[in-house]
Image (cartoon, grey):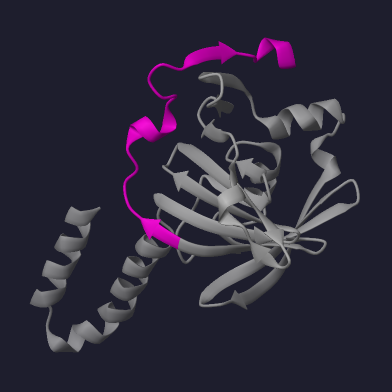
């Protein structure tokens, strides 16, 4: 892609002034599309505060995602960092539609199908029970977003998703709620034209906000169980 951009710019420089005015809008649009709709790779930071503060850190590559979360209790309206509790790390593999949960207490990595898919199966949900609507464009902070609603048997969540940062392999739905690529809700969102990064989500009074991001390559080791962990396959036991 970089070679393609260089070739376009070189040809642009050699053009006569009379022709340049026609190429400028086309070149600008092409380069903007490449930047805006490319795959986001890096780190997303989220904050979800109601009775407690929950901070989530999401590491994304084109085919995998890793979620780390921490619960910080509030006393008298103030967060108490000394009592913060780390939640179990979850790693999503989009290609195989599996998730791995890391249990630091027992040094085990439990592999299963997506929790979302297992929950849907237990509730006997079909694709028709998941309704996604696009309510149109809205501005959230500096981001241009589309406002989507996800309704599952009467339970509705609002998601504001931007393509300003590119496409993402995972949507943060709420606290401890993640829609990984290839899963039922992610597929519905993609079909509705979402395909970006969640900037804000709301479920009743619970609001989750994107507080920061870093675009960078993530080491592949971040998406694997640490050395010394025992891998436990629980796929069949959840069928």
Q: Residue at x 34, y 33 (%)?
A: 220
Give above or below for 109 relative to 45.
above
Give above or below for 107 relative to 183.
above
Across and down, in percent, residue 234 comes to 64, 14
Region rendered in magenta: 213-239
Q: Nearer the viewer, residue 143 or 206?
A: 206
Across and down, in percent, residue 203 comes to 78, 58
Q: Taking the image as drawn, is residue 159 in sight?
A: no
Across and down, in percent, residue 78 comes to 66, 66
- Extreme residue in the right direction: 154
Looking at the figure, which quarter contains the C terminus? Answer: top right
Left or right? Give the position of 133 relative to 46. Answer: right
Q: Nearer the viewer, residue 84 or 237?
A: 84
Across and down, in percent, residue 236 comes to 68, 10
Left or right? Give the position of 129 relative to 229. Answer: right
Give above or below for 172 relative to 112.
below
- Extreme residue in the bottom direction: 18
Write down the quadrant of residue 25 in the picture.
Answer: bottom left
Q: Taking the image as drawn, is residue 114 in sight?
A: yes
Q: Residue at x 36, y 69 (%)?
A: 32
Write down the quadrant of residue 74 in the picture.
Answer: bottom right
* Magenta highlight on residue 238: yes
Q: Residue at x 35, y 43 (%)?
A: 218
Left or right? Give the position of 238 relative to 198. Answer: right
Q: Residue at x 69, y 46 (%)?
A: 188
Write down the quadrant of residue 179 in the picture.
Answer: top right
Q: How many marks?
A: 0
């Amino acid at each position: 892609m970089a070679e393609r951009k260089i070739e376009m710019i070189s040809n642009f420089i050699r053009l006569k002034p009379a022709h340049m005015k026609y190429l400028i809008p086309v070149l600008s649009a092409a380069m903007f599309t490449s930047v805006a709709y490319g795959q986001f790779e890096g780190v997303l930071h989220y904050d979800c505060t109601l009775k407690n503060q929950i901070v989530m850190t999401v590491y994304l590559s084109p085919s995998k995602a890793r979620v780390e979360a921490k619960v910080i209790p509030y006393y008298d309206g103030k967060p108490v960092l000394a009592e913060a509790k780390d939640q179990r790390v979850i790693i999503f593999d989009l290609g195989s539609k599996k998730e791995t949960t890391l249990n630091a207490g027992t040094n085990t990595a439990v592999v299963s199908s997506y929790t979302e898919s297992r929950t849907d199966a237990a509730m006997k949900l079909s694709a028709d029970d998941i309704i996604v609507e696009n309510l149109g464009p809205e501005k959230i902070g500096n981001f241009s977003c589309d406002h989507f609603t996800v309704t599952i048997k009467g339970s509705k969540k609002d998601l504001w998703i931007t393509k300003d940062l590119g496409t993402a392999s995972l949507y943060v739905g709420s606290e401890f709620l993640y829609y990984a690529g290839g899963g039922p809700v992610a597929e519905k969102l993609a079909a509705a034209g979402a395909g970006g990064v969640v900037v804000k989500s709301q479920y009743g009074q619970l609001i989750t906000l994107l507080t920061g991001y870093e675009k960078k390559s993530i080491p592949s080791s971040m998406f694997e169980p640490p050395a010394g962990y025992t891998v436990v396959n629980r796929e069949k036991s959840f069928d």
